Image (spheres, rainbow, N blue to C red):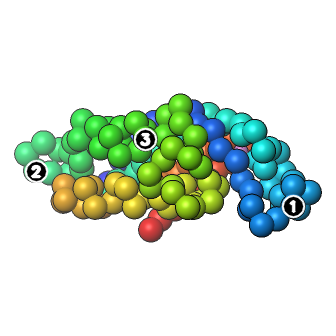
């Protein structure tokens, strides 16, 4: 089994809050990410696909296909957007890195499967020091 990873970047705004909680409680639980007037992160996304290299091409997956898929289904929807308000696949969800990583997986797993390989992991960095990994 060979693992291949495509790295992408996007910038997006969000806030973490629950409307039914007070501003004080939101601040206690979510810290700076609860700022009522939003804030942004420079996200880094690593999409890892696993499979056997094809006999004819030597590829696990055509990276042109993979980069185009991630661009259409993920980056174009998130880059320079407000995750809470603008992103169809994040509607009514918490805009946390954990929830976002799972939602990104759901956007791309099916089309990757159709290429005869499998999505192995989605790794999403919110900051240099904080990242999430999801394995389905
Ligand atoms: Ni934040």
Question: Which of the two discs, 2 and 3, labels the residue nearer the N terminus?
Answer: 2
Foreground pick, 127 / 10 = 10
Instruction: Quickly name the residue at label 1.
Output: 22
Instruction: Quickly name the residue at label 2.
Output: 55
- Tell me if 63 is positioned left or right of 32 in this view: left
* SS assignment at label 1: loop
Circle 2 or circle 1, nearest the eye: 1
Q: Position of residue 52 (x, y in %)?
A: 23, 57
Question: Which of the two discs, 2 and 1, labels the residue nearer the N terminus?
Answer: 1
Q: In percent of the image, x 32 and y 40: which residue is there?
A: 72
* SS assignment at label 3: helix
Which residue extends farthest front? 20
Q: Residues within 10 Å of mark 3 (few under 14, many from 20)?
A: some
* Quadrant including the C terminus: bottom left
Foreground pick, 79 / 127 = 79
Q: Position of residue 31 (x, y in %)?
A: 84, 51
Q: Are marks 1 and 3 in contact (CB under 8 Å)?
A: no
- Tell me if 132 is positioned left or right of 19 in this view: left
Q: In percent of the image, x 28 and y 61: which residue is there?
A: 110
* Quadrant including the N terminus: bottom left
Q: Residues within 10 Å of mark 2 (few under 14, many from 20)?
A: few
- Tell me if 68 is positioned left or right of 122 in this view: left
- Tell me if 25 is positioned left or right of 119 in this view: right
**In the rendered image, which quarter is residue 19 located in?**
bottom right
Circle 2 or circle 3, nearest the eye: 3
- The answer to whether 113 is drawn above or below residue 53 in the figure is below
Q: CA distance from mark 2 to mark 1?
A: 59 Å
């Amino acid at each position: 089994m060979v693992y291949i990873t495509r790295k992408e970047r996007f910038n997006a705004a969000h806030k973490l809050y629950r409307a039914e909680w007070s501003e004080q409680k939101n601040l206690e639980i979510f810290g700076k990410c609860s700022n009522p007037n939003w804030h942004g992160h420079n996200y880094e996304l690593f999409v890892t696909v696993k499979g056997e290299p094809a006999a004819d091409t030597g590829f696990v997956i055509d990276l042109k296909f993979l980069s185009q898929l991630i661009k259409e289904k993920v980056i174009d929807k998130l880059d320079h957007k407000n995750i809470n308000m603008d992103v169809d696949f994040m509607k009514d969800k918490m805009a946390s890195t954990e929830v976002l990583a799972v939602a990104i997986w759901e956007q791309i797993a099916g089309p990757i499967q159709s290429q005869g390989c499998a999505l192995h992991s989605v790794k999403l960095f919110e900051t240099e020091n904080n990242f999430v990994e999801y394995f389905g």
